Image (tube, rainbow, N blue to C red):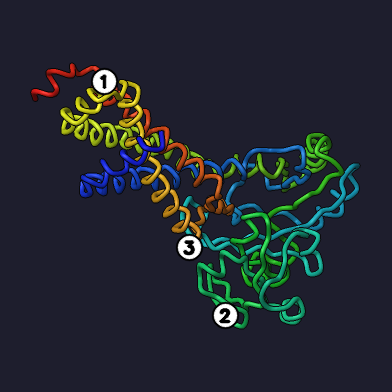
Amino acid sequence: MIALLQLALKQLARHRLRTLLTVLGVASGMFLFTSVETLQQSLAVATEETAADTTLVVYRENRFCPMTSLLPEHYAEEIRDIPNVREVIPIKILVNNCGASLDVVTFRGVPEGLLTKYAPEIEIIEGTAAEWEKRDDSALLGEQFAKRRGLNPGDKFDAAGITVYVAGVIRSPFPQDNNVAYVKLNFLQQASRSGLGIVTQFNVRVESSGDLDSVAEAIDARFKSDQQPTNTRPEKAFFAETAGQLIELIGFTRWLGLGAVIAVIALVANSILLMVRSRVKENAVLRTIGYPGRAIMFLVLSEGGILGIAGGFFGAGLAWVFLRWQSFTMGSEGHTLAVLPEVSTVILATLGALVLGIVASLHPAIIAIRQPIVKSLRS
């Protein structure tokens, strides 16, 4: 078997240009497939609820864009009185674009002293917490956001009509935190001219995931007759509902992924078929000196598998490096989706390319073993 693999490598090396073009073609297809799979996985992480989810989002009823969701800040006190509510944090959100787009700038205004409660997982990796507390216009930027914009502590930047001072850069296990700018709530209310005491939403933490539905119903019932009625949903369900344009766009990419798979199969099958037809006499000689048909079949399948795994590893690896380097984000209705690939995606794409290469080689392999020996020797 090892000898046959070595022979397959030598056969591919004999046709360097054809092999190189095939590997590059497979790599292109798997680059696209890896990018699509990364989008799908990022969306799944952002929208699929788990037993560990205990956060509700209280939003203005029939509103989606943060610019139109205006709620009185004093609602927080009444929400705290509802049973099974552990924490209530009023938040003001401001974005430079409410529609589905790339590279959305999102400001999150959080009450001073409550940032660690709202996002306890964040870690300041550049700058200091003292600098953040010292200035009213200070901001803590997510790591990916700062990298994409080329910002460091001490810099100033302007977006959506707001100018802030970069006090630090933060890192979080949650992708959304790495792609926003945290500022003080009072500062954002004044800078955006929405007025003090007005927020976009409330993030409500409940005692357990089993309390999500009952608490959401209680909150909406409490404010149903007020001037600003609310619509309360679990955090991930809220994202899935408000980011409809984004989800529809990502859903379409599945067809691109399917097209990439079909293209890889066709490319490898065509390349292997050409190799088989150019080696009719060589295969006949191998069978004459004692190689069984299954050995010839294994040889052809090995060539397809090698082409597949080489192109898959190159294309998936390149996609991983590119997406990590560019730090793409997609935004819609004030919510950001970080497009960050995982190593598992690269492994999946590489193994998938290996399988596709073997499957694409099946037909050429069958042709190779069905050719009569005598006729092949005379060809």
* Measured Cα–Cα span from mark 2 to mark 3: 23 Å
Residue pictured at 43% horizontal, 52% vertical: 319
Q: Secondary structure at mark 3?
A: helix
Q: Is residue 52 left or right of residue 175?
A: right
CB atoms at circles 2 and 3 under 8 Å apart? no
Question: Which quadrant: the N terminus?
Answer: top left
Nearest the eye: 69 or 308: 308
What percent of the width, then of the height, locates residue 326? 46, 62
Q: Secondary structure at mark 1?
A: helix
Name the disc covering residue 325, or none.
3
What percent of the width, then of the height, locates residue 223? 79, 43
Residue 225 seen: no
Residue extending farthest to the front is 289
Question: Which quadrant: the C terminus?
Answer: top left
> Which callout, 3 or 1, points at the residue further toward the start of the chain?
3
* Measured Cα–Cα span from mark 3 to mark 1: 47 Å
What amino acid is at disc 3?
A: Trp
> Which callout, 2 or 1, points at the residue further toward the start of the chain?
2
Q: Which residue is mark 1?
A: 369
Residue pictured at 72% horizontal, 66% vertical: 123
What amino acid is at disc 1?
A: Ile
Q: Is residue 22 left or right of residue 169?
A: left
Q: Is residue 68 left or right of residue 352?
A: right
Q: Quadrant of residue 70?
A: bottom right
Nearest the eye: 325 or 334: 325
What amino acid is at disc 2?
A: Lys
Residue pictured at 34% horizontal, 26% vertical: 295
Q: Secondary structure at mark 2?
A: strand
Q: Which residue is mark 2?
A: 156
* Closer to viewer: mark 2 or mark 1: 1
Residue pictured at 67% horizontal, 68% vertical: 170
